[in-house]
Amino acid sequence: MPSKPFPATGRRVLVSGAARGLGRALAHTFAGNGDRVAVHYGTRRAEAEETLRALPGGGHVLLAADLADPEGARRLAEETADALGGIDVLVNNAAVNTPHPPADTAFDAWTAAWRQHTDVNLLGTAHLSHQAAQQMIAQGNGGRIVNIGSRGAFRGEPDHPAYAATKAAVHALGQSLAVALAPHGIAVASVAPGFFATERVAHRLSGEEGEAIRAQSPYGRVAEPEEIAGAVRWLASPGAEWSSGTVLDLNGASHLRT
């Protein structure tokens, strides 16, 4: 077990895929908690800079990496530790989600979609988790890893099957890591959000499609990114250690697992 207590605030937090949307909300939530945040981006530098400028507090950093490349994941963890003086919390948010319906997608496009989703959503998460965990173990005060999964891992995504499959794998990865890393005081959990409102999906929330999406939940709405971020912040807190291994549904009762 770690010799030093896991801190409640003032932590060193890496949020992958933090340029916009949920990643931006996650970065803001941790910064508002008094933590220092490494804002990671892949290609959206201008939006990531906007995220960084808006964060409360100080000591935050902006870092770029291609998480489809194992070396990119290794370098991101190393640069985060160098910039922040260590890593206490990793939030694996970076992901791709491009449509590839099986009946209408040519085989070359189909295989490319599966490779891209696997490289980023699953392997990028696995490699970054490994490197962050190595840093946490060396520090000796435990840590937290929270993965952003998906409701689609349980109910299926007919137009995005590789997304659903890789998110299911991320849930399983998190549970394996929870068992493996517990002796080092590192708790690992995942969240499985349903539909939530971001810039990327705003066009889908108007008209009949928007009505149908909101009707999936008995609340008659979709989530806000801040609601997902709040749950992630709790899972990354000192008091959430006993939730290690969980996959937390955040879908407004739109899909109930048995």
Image (spheres, rainbow, N blue to C red):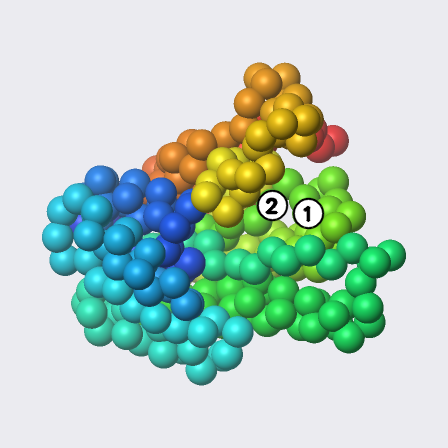
| Residue type of the residue flagged with mark 1 | Ala
Marking on residue 153: 1
The residue located at (83%, 58%) in the rendering is 104
Cβ–Cβ under 8 Å for marks 2 and 1: yes
Q: Residues within 10 Å of mark 2 (few under 14, many from 20)?
A: many
Determine whether the residue tagged by mark 2 lies in a helix, strand or loop.
loop
How many badges with numbers are in the image?
A: 2
x and y percentages locating residue 151 in the rendered image: 64, 41
Q: Residue 225: name its quadrant.
A: top left
Q: Which residue is mark 2?
A: 150
The answer to whether residue 133 is above or below residue 243 is below
The residue located at (46%, 54%) in the rendering is 93
Please tell me which residue lies in front, 53 or 236: 53
The answer to whether residue 160 is above or below residue 206 is below
Return the residue found at the far left: 58
Marking on residue 125: none
Return the residue found at the far bottom: 71
| Residue type of the residue flagged with mark 2 | Ser
**Left or right of residue 241, residue 124 in this image:** right
Return the residue found at the far front: 207
x and y percentages locating residue 252 in the rendered image: 57, 25
Q: Residues within 10 Å of mark 1 (few under 14, many from 20)?
A: many
The residue located at (49%, 79%) in the rendering is 70
The answer to whether residue 100 is above or below residue 112 is above
> Where's the N terminus, which quadrant?
bottom left
